[in-house]
Image (tube, rainbow, N blue to C red):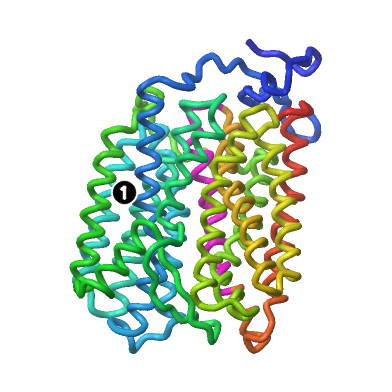
Amino acid sequence: MEIGKDNELEDSPADSQHIELVHNDIETNGGFAELVIQDDAHFPDGGVKAWCTALAGFLAFVASIGFLSGGSVFQSYYTTTTLSSSSSSDIAWIGSVQLWGCFFFGIWAGRLSDKYGPTLPFAVGTFFMVFGMMMASISKSYYQFLLSQGFCVGFGMGLIFTPALAVQSQWFLRRRGFVVGAVMSGQNVGGVYLGYSYPISSPQTNFTFFKSGIVWPVMANRLLNHDGVSLSWTLRIIGFMQLGLMVAATILVQPRFPRTLEHDGLPVKQYLTDKRTILFAIAMLVMDLGIYVPWFYITPYAMRYGASASLAFYDAAILNGGALLGCYALGIIADSGVGFFNSLTVATFGCAIVAFAWIGAQNTVGVIAWAIMYGVLSGALQAIFSPCLSLLAPTPEVIGSWNGIGIAIASFAVLGTGPIAGQLLSDTGDNSYLPMQLFTAVSLALSGGFYLVTRFLVSRDRWV
């Protein structure tokens, strides 16, 4: 059932939330297509296949982007042992390229998922991710680690990340926020800072801080620094575990639509001519420029204002634990009737306000309180962008492509955020975090502005 703008719904907020936005053929409002409301009856929103797909997405996130939470363990180990002749900034590019690849290569992975189902990109991505880990296990020089653990593993993760995320929106609408948040929490399962610790020196600071996690960082730290296992076998063990997780995920994930043999390419032109989608992609890019900065620097920042190394370690735990909560919380709120775009816009401005408040967090209690708030809000933002992108897709069949293109655009911000933040800190002689804090807050505020404009261009319905 489709209802035009002249016959607006008077449903409750919860009812009006559960819509799928589609494009009309008529262009009005200076090139903005009118949006109509489509019945959501064709979304299963449950069932064995749908929930198996959600579990597959969670496992895929643990195996892929969740592994990135252990990057600091390898950064420190390479700096002090294997690649001691290379600079810390050069070694940091291994993890940066890996994260960039995880986002950028989704532009093709999303399309593959739309055309052939998520099983194909999962399988190919698993091969490259595990192959890269095995090649890293026999690497000796910097360029070998950059090619194997950086580019090859990043490419494999990129083929997994976007399909694991986007396919959820093809199965779910009424529960989309909760399910996507649950899948996204897989990265936090690998990144909640618990258990063991290992000292890591930041190349931009004089502080030594501690970073660890539930799955990959704890495992890598335990094998390398406590059990005396070699780097080669540590990488192989992780690779075999990733393989096991991804085999399970590949078996569980279910395609929503039949395969198509049409040889049509990426809908880049269609994407780039939709001003709503472009504004949303810009908002994502600007958001990603600043949102990750506190994650890199919360521990040395806490130590600067009086926290012990042990307490600063728990500040990082609180930040990531808050993100785990935020992944679920905002999705549930959006599903309840507030709307995906409303939730994302308000949360982004809220996160910007909290980022400005970071300037005033200059004692132990203040930093802890700030870490709780920022963790929840920043985690929520990372979990809710995909449902919004999926609503902007012209049809459910191209949700993967829409997510892939948007995430690929934002990937360049992810590649640059670390170097930019580090340079801002270095320019002050490592004496002031203020430029970095302002950069984070202003980026989030600008992103909120772009989200707000997009939200009003999408629909005049209050609950969207």
Residue type at tag 1: Gly
Task: Kindly report the secondary structure that dominates the magenta region of the rendered protein.
Answer: helix
Location of residue 6 in the rendering, given as x and y in whole percent from the top left corner: 81, 15
Location of residue 449 in the rendering, given as x and y in whole percent from the top left corner: 77, 50
Q: Name the quadrant of the C terminus.
A: top right
Q: Is residue 42 left or right of residue 71?
A: right
Q: Is residue 450 left or right of residue 241?
A: right
Q: How many marks?
A: 1
Tell me which corner region of the image, top left, top right, bottom left or bottom right, holds residue 213: bottom left
Tell me which corner region of the image, top left, top right, bottom left or bottom right, holds residue 459: top right
Q: What residue range appears in magenta?
A: 395-419
Tag 1: Cα neighbours inside 10 Å, few (<14), some, or many (≥20)? many
Q: Is residue 404 above or below residue 240?
A: above
Judge whether residue 409 is colored magenta.
yes
Disc 1 marks which residue? Answer: 125
What residue is rendered at 57% in x and 18% in y? Answer: 40
Q: Is residue 418 above or below residue 67?
A: below
What residue is rendered at 67% in x and 67% in y? Answer: 365
Q: Name the quadrant of the N terminus.
A: top right
